[in-house]
Image (cartoon, rainbow, N blue to C red):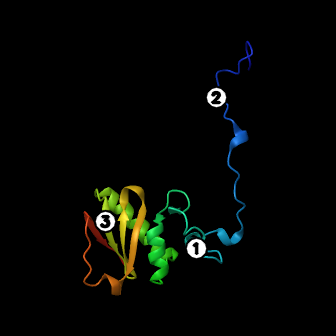
Amino acid sequence: MATDGKINNFLIPNVSKLPKHKKIDKTDQIGGGKNEFQELLKGQLESEVVKAPSDGIKLSTHAAKRLQERNLAMDSNEYFKLKGAIDKLKSKGGQDSLVITDKAAYIVDVGNNTIVTAMDKQNMLENVFTKIDSTLIVN
């Protein structure tokens, strides 16, 4: 109750400046008709870092361009492999890591959940990876 014109010392947030929420349709949900990550990749190549929903993986502009140039498809299976790899690397103290999947190789900034670059298996052969402190191979 209010006493002396005060409202029990509660902090009341300014809700007039909250961001507008995007309307979600059925195709935006997991398992929907559109591949959420592909849409995210296509729609934001110009920005510095593409963010996946919530605490997901971010994709640098460089990595997004490499995925597009090398025709590497980032499907939900690949996304979850990378997410699991980043979580494991964090638990082991990895910082700048090479993650190799059955489709491609990724250099990952583990602390920032960011894919820095990507290459297909053909480009990976005889390539030198520098400034990494760990490697994880997942399938």
Residue 42, labelled with which disc?
1
Indicate the position of residue 120 as horizontal and vertical percent values.
38, 82
Mark in front: 3 vs 1: 1
Quadrant of the image containing the C terminus: bottom left
Tell me the amino acid under the disc marked 1: Lys
SS for dot 2: loop
> Which residue is situated farthest in the front direction here?
46
Which residue in the protein does label 3 denote? 97
Residue 73 in view, yes or no = no
Disc 3 + disc 1, Cβ < 8 Å: no
Which residue in the protein does label 2 denote? 11
With respect to residue 134, does 137 lie above or below?
Answer: below
Tell me the amino acid under the disc marked 2: Leu
Query: First in sequence: mark 2 or mark 3?
Result: 2
Give the CA separation, mark 3 to mark 1: 25 Å
Residue at point 63% right, 76% down? Answer: 34
SS for dot 3: strand
Judge by depth and name the residue closer to the eye, 71 or 32.
71
With respect to residue 38, does 83 lie above or below?
Answer: above
Indicate the position of residue 29 as horizontal and vertical percent values.
64, 68
Judge by depth and name the residue closer to the eye, 80 or 62.
62
Taking 116 as reference, is 77 left or right? right
Query: First in sequence: mark 2 or mark 1?
Result: 2
